[in-house]
Amino acid sequence: MPIDGGLSVIGRIGAIKWDSEAKLLNDKEKDNGTDPIFGGGLEYSNQSLFARAEYTRYMLDVDSGSSDEDVDIDLWSLSAGMYF
């Protein structure tokens, strides 16, 4: 959503399909799932360049043996690019 002078607010909502495998000595655990993600940030752009700062949260429901755990992963990112 544009704000003013090339500055925009960006949002993200969706789902992530994931797969994990952990090994410890002779023990091996596998898990997978599909869980929600959401986030947002700011972007500045002009005719040929852009810069973006974003936050995304991954809300995973992990099965760890006999119980389920909620694992939240927070990702902060900075990016820049050029339009061709």
Image (cartoon, rainbow, N blue to C red):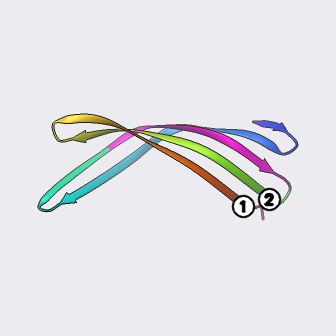
Left or right: 38 as drawn, with respect to 29: right
Determine the residue positioned at 20% across, 34% down.
67
Determine the residue positioned at 66% across, 56% down.
79
Q: Position of residue 2 (x, y in %)?
A: 79, 37
Q: Position of residue 30 (x, y in %)?
A: 23, 51
Note whether 2 is above or below 75 in the view shown. above
Mark 2 nearby-residue class (10 Å; few <14, some 14–19, many ≥20): few
Residue pointed to by mark 2: 49
Quadrant of the rendering where the C terminus is positioned: bottom right
**Tag 2 secondary structure:** strand
- Label 1 sits on what residue type? Gly
Determine the residue positioned at 33% across, 42% down.
33
Say which quarter of the image contains residue 8. Answer: top right
Q: Which mark is residue 19?
A: none
Note whether 81 is above or below 62 in the view shown. below
Left or right: 20 as drawn, with respect to 14: left
Determine the residue positioned at 26% across, 47% down.
31
Q: Position of residue 34 (x, y in %)?
A: 37, 40
Quadrant of the rendering where the N terminus is positioned: top right
User: Main SS type for the magenta part?
Assistant: strand
Residue pointed to by mark 1: 81
Q: Which residues are magenta?
A: 33-46
Note whether 25 is above or below 78 in the view shown. below
